[in-house]
Image (tube, rainbow, N blue to C red):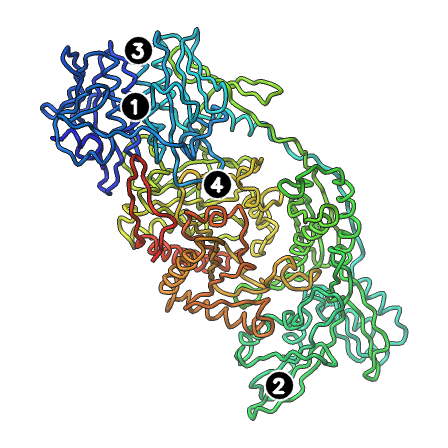
Amino acid sequence: MDNIFAIWTKEGLLRDNNNDGVIDGTAVYIDLPDHLAPEGLIDFCARLGYETTSLSLRFFEPDKNAVKMNFIHSDVKTEIRLENRELIVRYKSEAELSDLLKHLAAMDPKESSGTSVALELKDGRLTAGQSFIKTIEGRKAELTPEINSLSDLWSFSGIGDNNEASPSKLLNLNVSVEESIKTADLIKGLCCFAARSAMCSTDIIFPVTGNGSSSEGLRLEVLGGSSASLELTEPNVLQLKGPKELLGLAAQHLAREKHWSEGGAFGYWEQGYLLKQKTEAPLLFEAEWEDVQETDLAYGVLKGSGDLEGADIEVFLSEPVEVRRNLEKQWGNLFPKVKTLKVRSAFKTGMHWLVEEVLPDLRESAEDVLGLEIKVKKETGEHGLELPIRWIQEMYPADRLIEEEYNLKAAQINYQLEDKLEHTYEVFRVDAQGVRHFAGSLDVPVSELPYVDGKHYVYPVSSAVRIRKGGIVVREQLIQTDRERFYRHYTEEVLPRIRREVADYKDGQGHTRPLFDRIEIDVWMSEEERKLPVDEERVSSLEALHEDLYFNTLDYFAHMGEELEGKPFNAPGGVHPFLHVRKGGKPEACIRVYSWEDKPLENWVTTSILFNEEGALAKAIMTNDKEEVTLAIEAFEKPEGHIHQDVQRWLDEQRSYRILYPDHSYKGHAIPIIECFMDAGEEFYSPLKMSLFKKTIFIEAGHHSNEVSSTPAVLQLLERAGKKFGDWQKEINLIILPLANPDGYELVKKLAKEHPEWKHHAARYNAVGLEYSLVRFQKTVFGEANVYPKILRRWAPDVIVDDHGIPAHEWVQPFAGYNSPPRFPVSYFLPSAKIYGIGRLSSGDHRDLHVENLESVVSKISQYISGTSIDKENQYWQERFRKYGNQWLPEVFPIEEAPGIHFYRQADVAPSYSTIGISRYPDWIAAEIISEAADEVVYDEVLESCIEAHIVFDLAILEVLQKARIEVKRNGLSHERIRPIKLS
């Protein structure tokens, strides 16, 4: 440095350690004599901290590579001068020295263009020769740190803990020191405190000291006392007290303490205390159910039907195919005079009939079959939830099954939806000349029962015995399937009982916290459980029951909320159905309901921190206005293991990135995040300021924990990004939340032990069945809901990506209209793509820019996917989606095409609400995108293909962000850049 005006540049006291163009360190050794204690040095160090994104608080440690700052008493003048590449500070008095340092701290950045080797204090102003140097002192405070508890001081987001996120934070700090206790050691400690506070800020008000008249902002008062403590006397007012000989050490320790999420101890006393208060939910009641098998009921009907000679008998049973074949033989022997006896499936009846009977008959007939036309009756059940194409849905995926087993392509098998058809299905073979020939018909028996909303009905396939003589039906006896009888018991007996038990609920229950902790349902039944040789498809009536029990329970309580409060209870509690196949056994069930202990949220406030004799933090005193507790201050110990094996493996192997733990889930799992940025080798860093100078992206994975590919995908993304983009961290900060919902994942693992390939939607929400994103930015006991807001407050990202998933195979709910749940405005009956995207859009002034940004993202993702295997799979699923849904009901099965991928912008696919980043902060978030891969729940090659799809999707967004341009400007002392950025 050869110019004193360069003091606040990297030619002066600042450094760019990693050569990325951003100031990320300081290089000064302040050789403060023991007899000096100038308060103005606190301002000077605040400016040092403010000018950098990271530092190590080594201002007072000798460093041969740093600029040395010496202090010399002078009878002549007070000045700072460059001599032999050192800063020599001459001072007439400690008061003038303090003023000089304050003015240096507040020097206008525009003055850096001047040239001089010395600056002098004259008449209370800073001068260079005969020219006065402009300084900037202060302005009206905007968003400043909020300290309502001492644990907020060093928070996950820096200094203070604001509820709302913002890309800017103004430090309005005033430090005052009682004259009688001033020492050089105390000033050094306070310098470090001020530097760290300023580093966390994007704007600052000077002076930091000597502004005792100010009542705004954050105040730190340093006073004498008999023992060392830090006290919060009122919000944003701190008092550091203690004996003179101990205060310097206490201030040093306070300045260097790390938040517990970084492996430190600060604030963990509160977190640890809350974790220890958790208790297991008590059992509210337990109920059991059992019944006779539907096979016994069907046999009773046959036995009591009198003369069956010459009869054609159709029996519909919800049993595995081998059980049905055995019954055909057994009952054929018991009733030898019947003409024919068929035992058909009461689940996906049309598909089973076509594959098990019609196609084998055609094969045996040796007739040429070049195609099939299947006429399907349009569903018209009164007040029914079924779609008009319900009977087409029940055929899925018959065409692909036929393609796999017969010499016939799926494209040659077509459906016709008929308003009026004598039978449920009529099948025609098409010969080589294109002539149609009748091949068979089927009438499917249906039951009728009310839906849980009290407004609709559903018409599931029923078990039945149908007896024909001479082609005329002489008897048809419906028999409720085992599934239907249990479902009726559950909805007519169990759910009303739960409703009575939770009737005395408190305000907010059912919305931000549950009515009950959870329902555990164990069911044993003889049902078909079979994987099909097509895609990831399977026949599983118990999986369908699992989905019905889960989603229909949600709808039952949603309706209850509408009745009682005019708004649905969308968070009734966890619903955990465990379904067990018991071939040939009678149906049984056990239901256990656990109560929610609705304790008021206690607002614990740390009022005092006590220091030990070495000046280290020793104890914290908390109060909730009712009682006071004193807790030892201990460091947070990072967990030894992680519940997800991929995350654990990655944590064990990686050494390049910072791992932090912002919060714990409701069940106590520490939730890690990964911060990827160009490290400067310093001890403390300011993510908020780093996001000011670099574009920042936040990727969330594992929010719905049955969507299994996003977690391994984001972990692999890091390696792929390095290979593709090189030193991408020179331009981008990336924050990854690899498993947002560990409690849900814990339930997925438990459910998947018995049924590893079911969708397991019961585990998509948190431990008590709450879509916890709805309670973000609120005080809540659900720590998993806090991580997203904390990341936004810490990093203020430009782009947010939420990697999700959809079912990999058919989603059916016979007791909810056979389709996916009625609570969804569009259908998820079958996959629509290998991966598709959803763009969230804001309303208001920046909507046009958000639309433009989204189109830039869509275009780049299309480029990445077009021509790849992902594109090929997307095309395959688009054809399937059209055939079984979109061509009939385009509004229920929507497609918004981009090259190689569907990309949805419709509000009904991605509704906006206040806990979504771009909806809450449209003024500075540039884009928020969701990916949806067909990954519920998949393994091996299919899982790898979903992982690859997520990685390609996210890499495309990284490239868009990498190419975007930003410009950081200074307005006085503040750093500013235009937001939202333009992604093109």
Q: Which numbered mark, 1 or 4, is in the foreground of this view?
A: 1
Q: Which residue is mark 1?
A: 43
In the picture of the structure, the residue carrying the numbered disc 2 is 429
Q: Label 1 is placed on what type of residue? A: Asp
Q: Residues within 10 Å of mark 3 (few under 14, many from 20)?
A: some
Check disc 3 and report the residue beneath it: 183
Task: State which quadrant residue 49 falls in.
Answer: top left
Residues tagged 1 and 4 counted as in contact (Cβ below 8 A):
no
**Real-space CA distance between mark 3 and mark 2, rounded to the nearest whole angstrom:** 99 Å
- In this rendering, would 260 be left or right of 86? right
**Kind of residue at badge 2:** Arg
Check contact, mark 3 vs mark 2: CB within 8 A.
no
**In which quadrant will I find the N terminus?**
top left
Instruction: Indicate which disc, 3 or 2, sits on the residue closer to the N terminus.
Output: 3
**Image: 639 above or below 618:** below
Residue that carries the numbered disc 4 in the rendered image: 789
